[in-house]
Amino acid sequence: MNELADLTEELVAIPSHEDETAAGDAIEEWLRAETDARVERDEAGNVIAYKGATGDPDADTLALVGHHDVVPPADRQTTGEGNAGGYVVERREGRIFGRGAADMKGAVAACMLAFRDAEPPVDRTLAFASFVGEEVGGEGARHAIDEGFAPDRAVVAEGSTNYSKPGVTDVAVAHKGRRASTLVASGTAAHASEPEAGENAVYRASDAIDEVRELDAPEATVFGERASGSLAVTMVRGGETWNVIPERCEVTIDERTVPGDRADIGRAAEAVEGVAWEIDQDLPPMACDDDAFADAALAAAREVHDELGLDAPEHVVKPHATDAGWLAEAGTDPLVCGASEPGEAHTETESVGVDVLERCYRIYEDIGERAF
């Protein structure tokens, strides 16, 4: 399917790590040229399109969702500095190499073609959305949701390939979130020759760390799949010089949350005098609560795999936060299904398999046409 590979290369070649405008322009122009859908571009730069039962207020809406921003490229992946230079794109040995090929312009291209080609049931609105700002905390998704983007269901085309076994594209029914927080220990400075004259913030931080080590990591079960979170102190910063009792010490904590459960980090702050807890980032986890949708999506994926002579995909839990978390928080039932394989995104050798993109296109088209 050369059209899909060509469209992927076209999108990958457009720089979008500092400014997503040109990539959004390309997506918008393609949708207007290739479909009769209602195409919108909001103030944030998100591209959203609708077709099917758009005039029926009782129609369900299914959205195919991606993002067209990328993380900054390595030197070898760009032909110039910033958005002034293009990205290097290569196709060889059945794969497309370039920044954003896996995460996630290849999957966006597959969604675009599936959106164009799918014929949804008469009582369904089929939507397509490509967001900006996913890599910096879901800025585009949050803006779209605030402006009223509220599909009943969504297939978020982030990576789910090679999760249950090699060579399959699975359907993730849940994923972990990420909460980044800081315990701030305050003390009183004094000369280190008279430590009793001060209050050592590092000691207070150490006591708080001991409390964190006793906390249970988050856990949940979704569709029989166990989702286990994690909790870890990742940085400690305190003191300014060798002969002064430190008056401040900061402890950074990385927590991977799961649907319905989070660690009680506040307990560590409450247990130690002079320690406060600050939340720096909170990317929500995701769980799909629509059994029929999850089963239908898996059936679609299995039919495609069976036709290709591949092993059957499974319902899985994805370890990484995506825009599906923001959608779930807003009331959408999302699933994650996409071409990116573990270890491909954000690397100097980032790539995606053309055959896997074609597989995803077929899955998305089938889900768009399937009754739930």
Image (cartoon, rainbow, N blue to C red):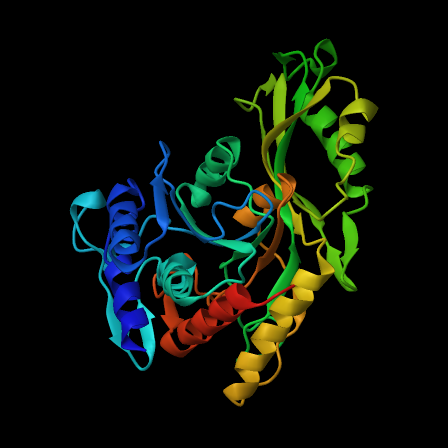
Q: Please, is residue 350 above or below residue 70 in the view? A: below
Look at 28% across and 65% down and name the residue there: 7
> In this rendering, does residue 69 appear at all?
no
> In this rendering, does residue 40 appear at all?
yes
Which quadrant: the C terminus? bottom right
x, y percent for residue 186:
67, 17
Q: Is residue 283 left or right of residue 82?
A: right
Q: Is residue 217 left or right of residue 74?
A: right
Q: Of 135 and 368, which appears nearest the observer?
A: 368
Q: Please, is residue 340 above or below residue 288 in the view? A: below
Q: Is residue 330 left or right of residue 73?
A: right
Look at 56% across and 42% down and name the residue there: 57
x, y percent for residue 26:
25, 51
Q: Of 61 and 154, which appears nearest the observer?
A: 61
x, y percent for residue 166:
56, 79
- In which image quadrant can residue 210 be found? top right
Q: Of 254 and 154, which appears nearest the observer?
A: 154
